[in-house]
Image (cartoon, helix red, strand yellow):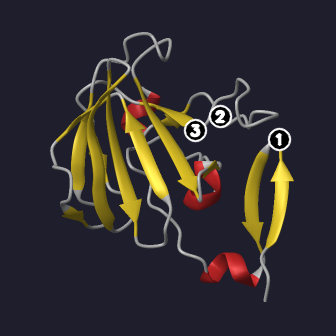
Amino acid sequence: MAALVVWTAGVALLAGAAAAASPRWDWPARGSLGEPYRAPPTPYAAGHRGIDIAVAAGTAVLAPADGVVSFAGPVGGRPVLALSHDDGILSSFDPVEATVRTGERVLRGQPVAVVAVSAGHCGADCLHLGARSDGRYLSPLALLGGVPRAVLLPLDDQARG
C-alpha cells in the first residue's frame, strides 16, 4: 500500500496505514518548535532546510533513531553532527558539541551531543535538525510525526494561591 502524503503549510505529513507502519523518529530534544521547515523553490534557492527546536545551550541531544555517526566537526565554522540512519535517511544537528565519533554506532535515544551556543542562527539558543533522503531535504516533522499536541492541565491547589 502506498503512503498518502499530505502537504500542510509546506510540511509533508504521512497519512493512513502506511504512516503507522513507517518508522518514526523520536524528538532529539524536548523544546518548542521555533523556525519551521520551508522547502526552497529550487535545489539551490533560499529556504530553511530543517526545523529549529528552542532549547538552552547545554541541553542533551539524543539520536532520533538507530544509525551510524557519519560526520562530527565544523562546517562553515559551526559545529555539526550527522547520523546515517538504518532507513537511509541522514539527520544533521547544529550547533552541537558531539559526544560521539565518526563511525560509531548509535541507538535511538542515546545521547550523541549537547547543544552549543547558537551564534546567531536563532534569536535565542536552539537546535537545528535537518533530514535528507537521496540527497533531497525533507521536513523532519514528517519523521517525528508532526508537532506534539499541547495538553492543558488543571492547576493544583498550591499553584492557585
Three-letter residue code for mark 2: Pro
Tag 3 residue: 50
Query: At x 65% / y 57%, what residue is drawn?
Result: 142
Where residue 132 sits in the image (x, y, percent)? 56, 52
Going from the N terminus, do you reach mark 1 or mark 2 first?
1
Question: Residue 149's x, y, as percent?
Answer: 63, 51
Q: Residue at x 27, y 67 (%)?
A: 107
Q: Is residue 88 visible?
A: yes
Q: CA distance from mark 3 to mark 2?
A: 7 Å
Q: Is residue 161 left or right of residue 13?
A: left
Give the residue at mark 2. Answer: 36
Q: Secondary structure at mark 1?
A: loop
* Of 135 and 61, the residue lying toward us: 135
Look at the numbered discs 1 and 2 and tell me whether their residues touch, using CB distance below 8 Å. Answer: yes
Nearest the viewer among 157 and 150 is: 150
CA–CA distance between discs 3 and 1?
14 Å
Q: Where is 84 relative to 53, above or below? A: below
Closer to the chain start, of discs 3 and 2, is 2
Q: Secondary structure at mark 2?
A: loop
Q: In this picture, is 125 found above or below 50?
A: above
Residue type at numbered disc 1: Ala
